[in-house]
Amino acid sequence: MTSAVSSQTTVQSGTAGRGTWTVVLCWITVMLEGYDLVVLGAIIPTLLKTRHLGMTAGDATMIATLSLVGVAIGAVCVGPLADRLGRRLLLIASVVVFSVFTIVVPLAGSVTMFAVLRLIAGLGLGACMPVSLTMMAEHMPASRRARASTLTMTGYHTGAVITSLLALQVTDNWQILFYVLGVAGLVVAAIQWFRLPESEAFTQAKQATGAQRVPVTELLKPAYLRAGIGIWVASFMGLLLVYGLNTWLPKLMNDAGYPVPTAVTQLLILNVGGVVGLVVGGFVADRRGIKGTILGWFAVSVVMLGCLSIKMNSDILLNVVVFLTGVFVFSAMVLVYAYVTHFYPAAVRGTALGSASGIGRIGSIVGPTITGALVTAGIGHPWGFYFFAAVAVLGFLAVLTLPRHAPQVEPAA
């Protein structure tokens, strides 16, 4: 009896250790993505000031756009591969790809090569988040999958903060930012190779379906199609809001008449609110239901974005509204991903999450573009916030169409 208890304790300890590595390594991977997706914005002023490779503002815009295009393609393509080959292998490969091509970015001899390297790095980068979210969700029991998604995404904001702080220190030596990210990524990949376990849910699904491939068209079956359309639209609108606000909030605030220091501070407050919202949103969704929580979050986002269109004379009131905007807007988008991990079975979960992330990335390109056009036209404030509020309404309507419960359907072999 004593021997049996000891053996069981050892097994439980080993399982807990493997689970800890999954949580830590997936969180760090998402943190690296947050670092990368902010790094270009942090160095663009320096690149333009020093005329690196003769770079112009138009060149910088092209590079930034291609980076996001690469991320979108990577997110869409990785899902089917992860569902066929495994989460672990795809995550490690993705980290290696974006790390290697990030290290060589400073060595680019032309603007075109700079853009190509960022595009290829984006392919690897885009695959990291959906696979990490899938592994974290499958590591947690179904009743805690919303918290798994939101906890993982706090790594994104942590990475963004690290980039911002490091960029202030390196000033004109912007190359260091890429070397640090690339080397850190390779170190993480090496640790993943030895310590990251495969998802048990994937292993079980693989055993159930054998070696046969689950087709991408599985997502188009009647049981999944309604949810798929709603998820794609909600993800598009959610990332449009996240990237549109992160890119243009200081400028919109400045156009509204707030001084530059106040306008820039609002971006920090917005992201602090985002972290708080991720923690709170995941807890509420697991307790009250994911769909209902997302609806509430998008509804409050509409109100907060509408309030920002009004010039406020109180700094305290402004800070509160911006903070609440971050709380609800950022976590609404992540809760859409949590819905995906809850709704789809393991056999197609990676594909579903990859498609949601990939289509959402298109919104991350559209949002800053449209808002930039409004700013250029001189109507950034208040129309930028009217636009964001309308997008949040569309996100709300998209979530309204989602089924509340997952279908009891076995994926086709």
Image (cartoon, rainbow, N blue to C red):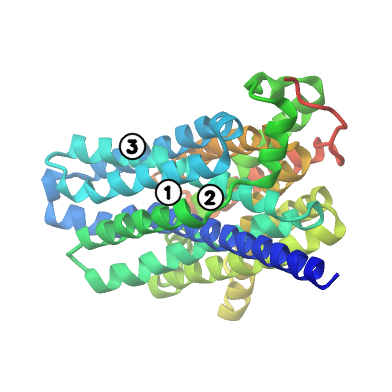
* x 49%, y 61%: residue: 28
Residue under label 1, please give it.
375
Cα–Cα gap, marks 1 and 3 = 27 Å
* x 62%, y 49%: residue: 135
Amino acid type assigned to the residue bearing label 1 in the image: Val
Residue 10 sits in which quadrant? bottom right
Mark in front: 1 vs 3: 3
Q: Earlier in the sequence, mark 3 or mark 2?
A: 3
Measured as percent of width and height from the top left, residue 173 is found at 17, 64
Horizontal relation, residue 56 to residue 204: left or right: left
Label drawn at residue 119: 3
Q: Quadrant of the C terminus?
A: top right
Q: Please, what secondary structure does the residue beneath circle 2 have?
A: helix
Q: Nearer the viewer, residue 412 or 331?
A: 412
Is residue 306 at all visible to an observer of this figure? no
Amino acid type assigned to the residue bearing label 3 in the image: Leu
Cα–Cα gap, marks 1 and 2 = 8 Å
Q: Please, what secondary structure does the residue beneath circle 3 have?
A: helix
Q: Please, what secondary structure does the residue beneath circle 1 have?
A: helix
Horizontal relation, residue 2 to residue 245: left or right: right
Measured as percent of width and height from the top left, residue 365 is found at 46, 40
Measured as percent of width and height from the top left, residue 269 is found at 53, 71
237 above or below 195? above
Mark in front: 3 vs 2: 3
Label drawn at residue 179: none
Residue under label 2, please give it.
384
Cα–Cα gap, marks 3 and 2 = 29 Å
* Residues under numbered marks 1 and 2 in contact, where contact means CB atoms less than 8 Å apart: yes
77 above or below 87? above
